[in-house]
Amino acid sequence: MVFRVAPGGRSILHSFGASFPVLRPTSMRTAKLSILACLTICNPTINAQITGLSSAPGGSEIVAFFSGTVTLQDGTRPPASVLIQQVCDGRLTATAWTDTGGRFSFMLGGRGSAPVATDTAYDPAMPAYFDRSTRGSNQYGNPIASLAHNCEIQAVLPGFRSDRVGVAVRTSLDNNRIGTIVLHPVTKAEALTVSATTLQAPVRARKACDKGMADMKAGKWRAAVANFNKSVAIYPTYALAWYELGLAFKAQSDAAGAVDAWKHSLASDGHYVTPYQELCALAYQNGDWNDLAEYSHNWILLNAEDFPAAYLYNAFAATNLHHLSDAEAMAREGLRIDKDHKYPRLSFLLGFVLLKRQQYAESAKYLRAYLQMVPGATDAAAVREQIARLDQASAMASSADGPPKP
């Protein structure tokens, strides 16, 4: 839906939001999302209820509201919150999260359309939120259409690939269809990202969990904690509720509470992989290398073929614990299964480990591979300097050996 918001107007629509780790975008199919778009001038009564959008010349600003649904291939709702991303001219932007019913909504075009925070442990390198100017016509002759030109929407959930859905903004009222994004399972990792306890949870426990997730979207962390605690009190082995409770504690910088909740989640369902992702990220952040080694090892034991991030974390732990042979083995195995090169740091880390082991030529090889994947990395200049030193050391070693004597 599209609105023109007057100066000082406040938006009463908010994106669904929750904290759920991002692993990686996956390949997609393309579909088409048709969304009702209407143009409205907000009156003074509405303006008193609506938040934070800047004024455009002429006394108003155009913003567009979108909503849709995410389902699994079999038509059931996703087992947890799903990240909604915009893909605009090849750029990825975190836009919203689904609620537990798979529904989402978001806004384009105003300062209220802020990006969703993502888990930096997976280094998604999201660009700034798409906020294209709507202050005038463009070659398309319609400022509303410019909000979403060349944009598609996709859903991100580990173990699934998503349809891509084109955003079609219309100014007529003749089409009120809301699109559905379908997630298709891609690997056996699917079973590990869904807790069987979710399907078994009593209605009251699920309702309390839903309320907790709604509280998190509104930034009401204490209320979220209370509702998640209520949920697990009703159903003590509710792995998803324990996991979300950990996220609520994490948002309040309560690391001990978060770790305890995630461990309860794993105790409730030992095949639920998602808590390991958060435990590894927190252990890495805090430099708890023994914990990181344990968590990442257990993660690998659950599925050794679908989670390169587990090998990256394990290699980091082994490096910092000075177990260089183990670090090399883990980095090489991570590179083997990271067929789409989603984790360039595996090459960087392997290059670093090989440098420590004085294997200079091979170290330079992997550091070059790292730069090929992320030429604009913040440490690119330092890595190039290191490669130059490695090349010099290799040349000196070859010269010292010299040709065989007659």
Image (tube, rainbow, N blue to C red):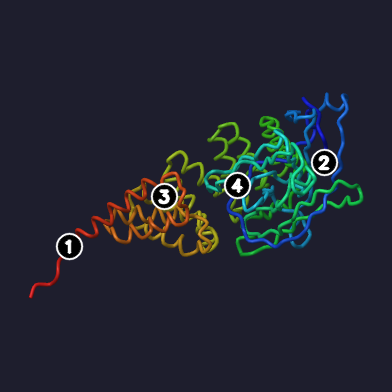
Tags 4 and 1 touching, CB below 8 Å? no
- Residue type at mark 2 is Val
Q: Is residue 99 visible?
A: no
Q: Quadrant of the N terminus?
A: top right
The residue that mark 3 highlights is 316
**What residue lies at 76% left-to-right and 30% top-to-bottom?**
57
Q: Quadrant of the C terminus?
A: bottom left
Q: Earlier in the sequence, mark 2 or mark 1?
A: 2
Question: Nearer the viewer's eye, disc 2 or disc 4?
Answer: 2
Question: Nearer the viewer's eye, disc 2 or disc 3?
Answer: 2
- Residue type at mark 4 is Pro
Q: Which element carries disc 3, helix, strand or loop?
A: helix
Classify mark 1: residues with Cα within 10 Å, few (<14), some (14-19) or many (20+).
Answer: few
Left or right relative to 385: residue 344? right
**Between marks 2 and 1, how big is the CA–CA gap?**
70 Å
- Residue type at mark 1 is Ser
Q: Nearer the viewer, residue 91 or 29?
A: 91
Q: Is residue 120 above or below residue 353?
A: above
Q: Nearer the viewer, residue 43 or 194?
A: 43
Dot label at residue 399: 1
Classify mark 3: residues with Cα within 10 Å, few (<14), some (14-19) or many (20+).
Answer: many
Q: Earlier in the sequence, mark 2 or mark 4?
A: 2
Determine the residue located farthest toward the right in the rendered image. Answer: 174
**What residue lies at 60% left-to-right and 47% top-to-bottom?**
21
- Residue type at mark 3 is Phe
**Between marks 4 and 1, how big is the CA–CA gap?**
50 Å
**Between marks 2 and 3, how big is the CA–CA gap?**
48 Å
Classify mark 2: residues with Cα within 10 Å, few (<14), some (14-19) or many (20+).
Answer: many
**What residue lies at 28% left-to-right and 55% top-to-bottom?**
390
Q: Nearer the viewer, residue 323 or 111?
A: 111
**What residue lies at 53% left-to-right and 58% top-to-bottom?**
307
Quadrant of the rendered image containing residue 63: top right
